[in-house]
Image (cartoon, coloured by chain):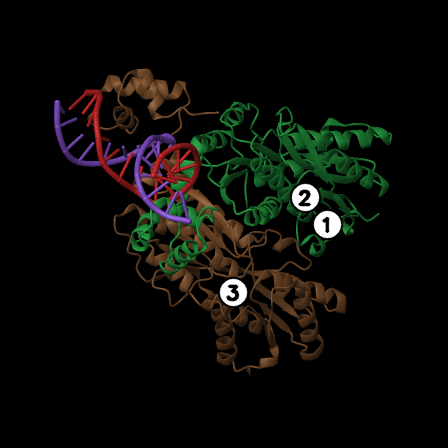
Chain colours: A brown, B green, C red, D purple
Amino acid sequence: MESVNIKKLAQILNLSISAVSKALRDSHDISKETKEKVIALARELNYQPNPYASSLRKHKSKTIAVIIPEIANNYFALAINGIESIAQEKNYHVLIYLTHDDVKKEIALTKYLHGGRVDGVLISVSSTTTDYTHLHQLEENGLPIVFFDRVCESFNTVKVTTDDYESSYLATKHLIDQGCKKPAHLAMSENISIGKKRMKGYIQALTDNGLPVDESLIIKCVNDDKQDFEMIKELLLKQKPDGIFAAVEQYALGVYGVCRQLNLAIPKDVKVICFSNLKTASFLNPSLTTITQPAFEIGKEAAAILFKALDKKSFQLKDENIVLKSMLVQRESTEA
Amino acid sequence: MESVNIKKLAQILNLSISAVSKALRDSHDISKETKEKVIALARELNYQPNPYASSLRKHKSKTIAVIIPEIANNYFALAINGIESIAQEKNYHVLIYLTHDDVKKEIALTKYLHGGRVDGVLISVSSTTTDYTHLHQLEENGLPIVFFDRVCESFNTVKVTTDDYESSYLATKHLIDQGCKKPAHLAMSENISIGKKRMKGYIQALTDNGLPVDESLIIKCVNDDKQDFEMIKELLLKQKPDGIFAAVEQYALGVYGVCRQLNLAIPKDVKVICFSNLKTASFLNPSLTTITQPAFEIGKEAAAILFKALDKKSFQLKDENIVLKSMLVQRESTEA
DNA sequence: ATGAAAGCGCTAACAC
DNA sequence: GTGTTAGCGCTTTCAT
C-alpha cells in the first residue's frame, strides 16, 4: 500500500516528527536547510499528508457540503460550477448530496454533516421542507449555512437568490404587453420561497395592469412530468389561456409537448415564457423567451460568502439577502 | 460549539469509552440494556460520531471521488445522478472534482486523493490527458479506479462506456440511408478513447457503404463555442456536406446556429445526428435525431462496480470493458 | 533550531 | 459484559 507518513520521513532524515511537520508547514523556527531536505524527500517519496489526521487535530475539514434537490438540471449544474470554481481556488473540497426534492432525505443527509465532516454548508432546500429543525441543528453545531435559490426566509443567515419577484412581474408584464389578456401561471410548490415570490410577481403584474386574478389560471405543478402534462393539458383545453408564465423550464417544456399534441400554435394561440437556463432555448421550435438566471454567479457568490465566513475565527453570517438579477431574453415564443 | 463525543457519553453513563463505542456499533458483547441506554442518550444529545477519527483509525473514509471534465453537461449530470443513487444506498460520500478538461488540473486534483481522503475514484479523463502517471500513482497508493465514458484504454481496470463504435457506425449509416452522399463528421479530440471510436465508426460506415473517406469532411472541434462555430461554418460553406454526424451535442447545436446564419435548411440541405442527452431534443427546430446514451446507468454501473470492489478485502479490479448500449432516436433532423 | 509529549475522537486487541 | 490500553497521523505547546 502506501504508508509514507511524517514518521517515516522523520526516521529517514533523522529528525523528530514535529520538526518534519513544521518544515512541511513552512514554520518559522525550522532552518532553511532542514526545510529543503524535508521537502525534497517528501516530493521524492510522493508524500501526501493524511487529511483526516489533520482534520481531527485541527477541527477543520477543508470541505463543504452542497445540498441540492437535483443535479440533472441546468440551473443546479451551473450553480455547482460556480461553487466549485471558488472551492478550487480556496483549496476546499466539495461533497455533493442530492435530496431528490424529498425532506426525509434532506434530514437524513444533514445528520451526516454533524460531527465535523464539513466546515460549512451550501443548500437549496427541497420543496417539501417546511420544518427547519434539521438545519437549525447544523447551525447549533457550529456549521455556517448559506442558502441559495430555494432559501428558508425565516432562517437567520445569508441567502443568495435572483430577483424572483421582479423578474416574475416583468415576465407577466411582458406577456400582457405582447397582447395576452388571460395569462396563466404554472407555479412551483408554495412551500418554497421562490415559488411564492414568482406567484406574487405574477399576481401583482395582473393587478397593476387591470387584469383579474383567476385561480383557475394558476396551476400548481408537482414535478412529475406525466401529471404535470395532464394538468397543463386540462388548463389549455378548459381555460384556454392566451399566455403562460412557467415558474421553471420543465413546465414550459410540458407546454410545448401539450401544444404539439393539441395542435396549438406558440405564440399564436398561446405565448410562453419561463425561468430557464437552457442552452438550447434559442433553438427550440419556436425559440423560447426566457428569464435567464445567473446560476453560475449565484453559486459562486454563495460559496464566496461561505468561505469568507470560514476564513474568520467567528463566522457570524449576517441575516442578509443577496440578489443577483436575472435577464429577460425575448424570443419567438412570446411574439405578438 | 458541539463536543458531544463518545467520551462525554461514557462519563454521563458511567461506562468506559470502549463500551460506549461498542454499544453504538451494536457489538455482540454488550448487554441489551447497556446498548439501549447508550443509544437513548446518544439520540438525546444528538450525538454524531466524528467521521475523521473513525477514518483515521480504520483507514477507510467511506467517501469516493468523482472526477469529471465538466458538470454543466447533461451527460455528466446524469452520470452523477447514477453515481449518487448508489452512493446514497451504500452510505458513501461523494466528492466532486471538475477538471475543466485540463490535464494540469486533473493532475493537481489527484494529488489531493492520496493520503486517504477517499477509498476509491471514478473518473472520466480530460481530453488533454495523454500521460497516465498521476492515475497510476493513485493505483499504487491502493486506490481502486473505475473509468467511465472517457476512459484510458491501456489502464488495467474496469471501464464503463457506451457502444461508441457501433453507435457511430449506426449514426453514419443512418445518414447514408437517409440519402446522404457526403456525410461529414464533427470529431472530438483524438486523444480520448471515445473520440477515436466515434471516428472509427464513422469511417467504417463510409467504407462499408462505398463512400470515400474525405479528410476535409472531418473537423476536429476544440470545445470552444466560437472557434467551433467558425470551423463548422467553413465546412458548410466550402465542403457543402449533406449530412453531419456530430460526436457531441454541443457541436450539433453549433450546426444549428450556423445553418440559421447561412440560411441552410435542416434536414433538406443538411441532415444532422449526434450523441446527446438533451431533454429538449424533440422540441428543437427541427427536432434533433440523437444517439442517446444511458448516462444515468453508466454512472450507476461504474459506481456499483467500485463499491463492490471496496466491499471486498482485496479489491482487484479486473481489466474489463463494460458496454451499455446507446439508442438511436430518429427525429426530423435526419428526415429524407 | 529541534525534540518530547500530549491529545484530537475513535477502534480494537486484550485483560479481567 | 465491561474496562484498559495502545495507537491511527498529525499538530502544537513546551522544553531544551
- How many neighbours does mark 2 have within 10 angstroms: few (below 14), some (14-19), or many (20 or more)? many
* Quadrant (top left, top right, bottom left, bottom right) of the C terminus of chain A: bottom right
Secondary element at tag 1: loop
Residue at numbered disc 2:
B252
Q: Position of residue A169 (x, y in %)?
A: 49, 71
Residue at numbered disc 3:
A127
Question: Distance between the Cα atoms at labels 2 and 3?
Answer: 35 Å
Secondary element at tag 3: loop
**What residue is at 69 percent from the left and 74 percent from the top?**
A236
Q: Work out whether disc 1 and disc 2 sit on a shared chain.
A: yes
Q: Amino acid at mark 3?
A: Ser
Q: Work out whether disc 2 and disc 3 sit on a shared chain.
A: no
Q: Position of residue B234 (x, y in %)?
A: 67, 36
In this rendering, position of residue A228 left or right of residue A328: right
Residue at numbered disc 1:
B288
Question: Distance between the Cα atoms at labels 1 and 2?
Answer: 9 Å
Q: Are marks 1 and 2 in contact (CB under 8 Å)?
A: yes
Q: Amino acid at mark 2?
A: Ala
Secondary element at tag 2: helix
**Disc number lying in front (2 or 3):** 3
Q: Earlier in the sequence, mark 1 or mark 2?
A: 2
**What residue is at 37 percent from the left and 56 percent from the top?**
A145
**Numbered disc 2: what chain?**
B
Residue A26: image quadrant is: top left
